[in-house]
């Protein structure tokens, strides 16, 4: 077996079993799922509780219910029996005798004030409130002139927004999808690549501080080792994304009945762009992390660095409002072209607007070149720094290492110091 | 018959800035021997080992290992025990050994079997599922050596293998090294402990400030540094013998008297003189051969520490 694959396999299997990874992979979706179920249960219990009010009393001083029209209800809901009372006192007495669970008063000035009061011992479930609302709506709409459908009175505006240069039409139903999906993608991307490249860096630091590096470099070349690590952990990141992806599909199916999630579909074009950006930008991130891991002296220092670098990827989120108001403005375009912010920016923008093809192409090209350069430079630094312990490395020294061969560098750095003396 | 060469080092030099770590060093290591590298701290031993292993490249000079320039294939035939020990601390012993074995070209299956066999041999089979950090230092050192020979290398390069070990573990490790050699393996070892070299090594290289000081079979070197003196035990007035310049009582080790001879006097002259002198008897008569430790100190002092 090729040694790169041996390293890749080991990194994958070893880190797969880490508690931190297992928590990220299963804990996060599980937590979301539990939240979902709780929200669901709460909503459902509200619906069901209509059954506990089989008899609903009312006092109609305004005379709006005298036609006795009943609203349509969903087939699985049993509408309560309505009991009319002449006065509030008699309704109150029925409530106290538990003949009815609740009663409501429609005062004489209802048409002008809209005021309705309900009385019960246990509070009013949402389902009953909306039932009373529909009841009044169907009855007063009978008294309006003309044949305006009930639906229009209930929901007078159903706005659809057309962005002139966008291929997507935003209707109320799919606005959440278009805003949510890029956000979800960007978050998944950041978490997956953050977790795995963090593993990469801490692994390198561990091998260096444990001195096992000396044994490793007599078995594999630095390039094999770097590539093996990057590939193994990249596969780990993809595993994480797959698990989350599956979790999202399940959640969306479960959640179809929730109004917010209705109509959310995963746009295919967004998926493809996501995968391409993910792969390139993961290599960029892990190349950087490996190089830094080889140079820094301690686990602690490496963590500081990794949070600084992750910040670059998160940066576009701070500008999300400006993206929403002007997705094709200067700032979004600039951030699309900078390799570190490109993946998140592009995903966010693609949700709201059509990004010109040249921008995507240019952004990907810049990202690709930066990635190749970073991995290459990282391998050089990696080779050179593996056996250096306890010395702080200056940025100028690093630049020299990248320019010259790693071996020549050790003497070069020294003679440069001599020259300076 | 010329022995087969395992390592040939030709005039290598390595400079770190203005610090010359290794200077024009040449030597050979023969197959099947234990070759000791000696020298004070910072004399260039580890740098030389790293150059042999291709971790570092020499500025000038040429190194051949196992019949040619070091390739990836040759690397799999070498085991290296670095001075600063290196093991994964939070990984189970067996798992770690298997990984390092496959990196040296073993199949997963071979790596598994050989790791188990070695652990058995080292009396560590019960610890196979433990994490390295749970083991004692002596056990870790044994595991480290097991990792070095796991892939059945032809050559092992072990840097200060005995440092920090208690006498029991030192003995155990020494047996392992001797057993490796007995099976035909070649050993390059650096150490500070002179008696280890005297006991174990066939030939040695002593370097100081990156340059060769002594090089050759251990016995030859000891003889070369023989004093013009004799150690005797017995009765008689040693100082009165003709040709004896001065005498000294040997304090360390076995008791005796050290006779320094005048430059023209041979040992045979003294032996004859003792035989013909009345009231003298000898129980021991031998050339005064210094210990490697004495030689080591002398060489370092001569070249100015």
Image: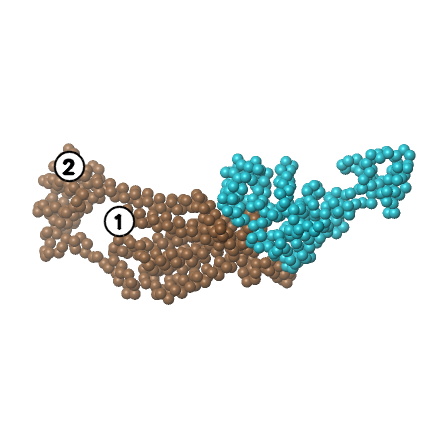
Chain colours: A brown, B cyan
Question: Mark 1 falls on what kind of element?
Answer: helix
Above or below — where is A334 with respect to A99?
below
Using the rendered view, name the quadrant where residue B172 is placed. Answer: top right
The residue positioned 54% from the left and 54% from the top of the image is A221
Q: Residue reaching furthest left? A: A67
The residue that disc 2 covers is: A100
- Tell me residue A83's x, y (percent): 11, 40
- Tell me residue A22's x, y (percent): 41, 44
- Tell me residue B278's x, y (percent): 91, 34
State whether residue A300 appears in this view: no
Above or below — where is B91 with respect to A392?
above
- Tell me residue A171's x, y (percent): 25, 58
- The reply to whether discs 2 and 1 touch (Cβ–Cβ < 8 Å) is no
The residue that disc 1 covers is: A256
Measured Cα–Cα span from mark 2 to mark 1: 35 Å
The foreground one among A391 and A57 is A391
Chain holding disc 2: A
Sequence-wise, which precedes: disc 2 or disc 1? 2
State whether residue B236 appears in this view: yes
Using the rendered view, name the quadrant where residue A43 is placed. Answer: top left
Direction from residue A172 to residue B33 in the image, left or right: right
């Amino acid at each position: 077996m090729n040694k790169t694959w041996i390293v890749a396999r080991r990194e994958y299997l070893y880190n797969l079993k880490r508690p931190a990874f297992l928590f990220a992979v299963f804990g996060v979706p599980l937590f979301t799922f539990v939240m979902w179920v709780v929200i669901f249960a709460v909503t459902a219990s509200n619906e069901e509780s209509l059954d506990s009010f089989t008899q609903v009393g009312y006092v109609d001083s305004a005379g709006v219910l005298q036609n006795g029209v009943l609203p349509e209800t969903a087939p699985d809901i049993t509408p309560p029996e309505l009991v009319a009372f002449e006065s509030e006192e008699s309704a109150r007495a029925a409530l106290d005798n538990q003949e009815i669970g609740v009663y409501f008063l429609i005062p004489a000035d209802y048409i002008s004030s809209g005021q309705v009061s309900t009385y019960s011992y246990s509070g009013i479930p949402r389902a009953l409130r909306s039932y009373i609302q529909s009841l009044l709506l169907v009855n007063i709409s009978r008294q309006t002139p003309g044949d305006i459908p009930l639906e229009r009175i209930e929901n007078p505006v159903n706005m659809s927004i057309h962005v002139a240069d966008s291929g997507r039409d935003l209707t109320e139903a799919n606005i959440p999808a278009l805003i949510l999906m890029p956000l979800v993608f960007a978050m998944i991307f950041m978490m997956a690549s953050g977790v795995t490249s963090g593993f990469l860096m801490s692994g390198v630091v561990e091998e260096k501080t444990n001195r096992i590096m000396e044994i490793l470099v007599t078995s594999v070349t630095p390039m094999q080792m770097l590539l093996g690590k990057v590939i193994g952990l990249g596969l780990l990141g993809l595993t994480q994304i797959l698990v989350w992806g599956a979790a999202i599909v399940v959640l969306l199916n479960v959640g179809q009945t929730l109004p917010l999630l209705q109509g959310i579909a995963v746009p295919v074009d967004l998926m493809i762009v996501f995968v391409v950006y993910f792969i390139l930008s993961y290599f960029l991130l892990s190349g950087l992390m490996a190089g830094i891991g080889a140079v820094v002296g301690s686990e602690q220092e490496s963590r500081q660095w990794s949070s600084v670098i992750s910040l670059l990827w998160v940066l576009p989120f701070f500008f999300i409002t400006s993206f929403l108001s002007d997705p094709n403005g200067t700032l979004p375009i600039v951030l699309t072209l900078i390799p570190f912010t490109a993946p998140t920016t592009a995903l966010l923008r693609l949700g709201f607007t059509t990004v010109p093809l040249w921008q995507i192409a240019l952004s990907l090209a810049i990202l690709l070149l930066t990635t190749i350069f970073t991995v290459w430079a990282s391998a050089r630094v990696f080779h050179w720094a593996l056996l250096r312990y306890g010395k702080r490395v200056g940025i100028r020294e690093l630049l020299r290492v990248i320019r010259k061969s790693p071996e020549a560098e050790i003497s070069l750095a020294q003679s440069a110091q001599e020259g300076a003396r | 018959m010329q022995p087969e060469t395992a390592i040939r080092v030709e005039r290598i030099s390595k400079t770190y800035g203005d610090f010359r770590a290794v200077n024009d060093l040449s030597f050979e290591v023969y197959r099947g021997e234990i070759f000791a590298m000696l020298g004070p701290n910072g004399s260039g031993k580890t740098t030389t080992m790293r150059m042999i292993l291709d971790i570092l490249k020499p500025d000038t000079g040429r190194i051949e290992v196992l019949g040619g320039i070091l390739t990836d294939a040759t690397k799999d035939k070498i085991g290296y025990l670095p001075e600063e020990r290196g093991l994964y601390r939070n990984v189970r012993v067996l798992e770690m050994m298997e990984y390092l074995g496959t990196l040296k070209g073993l199949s997963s299956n071979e790596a598994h079997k050989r790791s188990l066999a070695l652990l058995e041999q080292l009396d560590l089979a019960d610890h196979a599922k433990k994490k390295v950090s749970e083991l004692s230092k002596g056990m870790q050192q044994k595991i480290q050596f097991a990792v070095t020979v796991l892939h059945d290398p032809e050559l092992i390069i072990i840097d200060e293998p005995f440092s920090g070990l208690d006498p029991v573990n030192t003995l155990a490790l020494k047996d392992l090294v001797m057993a490796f050699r007995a099976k035909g393996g070649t050993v390059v070892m650096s150490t500070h402990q002179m008696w280890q070299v005297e006991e174990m090594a066939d030939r040695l290289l002593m370097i100081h400030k990156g340059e060769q000081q002594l090089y050759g079979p251990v016995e030859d070197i000891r003889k070369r540094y023989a004093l013009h003196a004799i150690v005797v035990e017995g009765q008689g007035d040693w100082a009165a013998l003709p040709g004896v310049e001065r005498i000294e009582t040997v304090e360390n080790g076995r008791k005796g008297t050290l006779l320094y001879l005048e430059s023209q006097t041979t040992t045979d002259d003294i032996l004859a003189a003792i035989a013909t002198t009345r009231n003298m008897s000898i129980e021991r008569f031998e050339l005064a051969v210094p210990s490697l430790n004495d030689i080591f100190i002398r060489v370092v002092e001569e070249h100015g520490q």
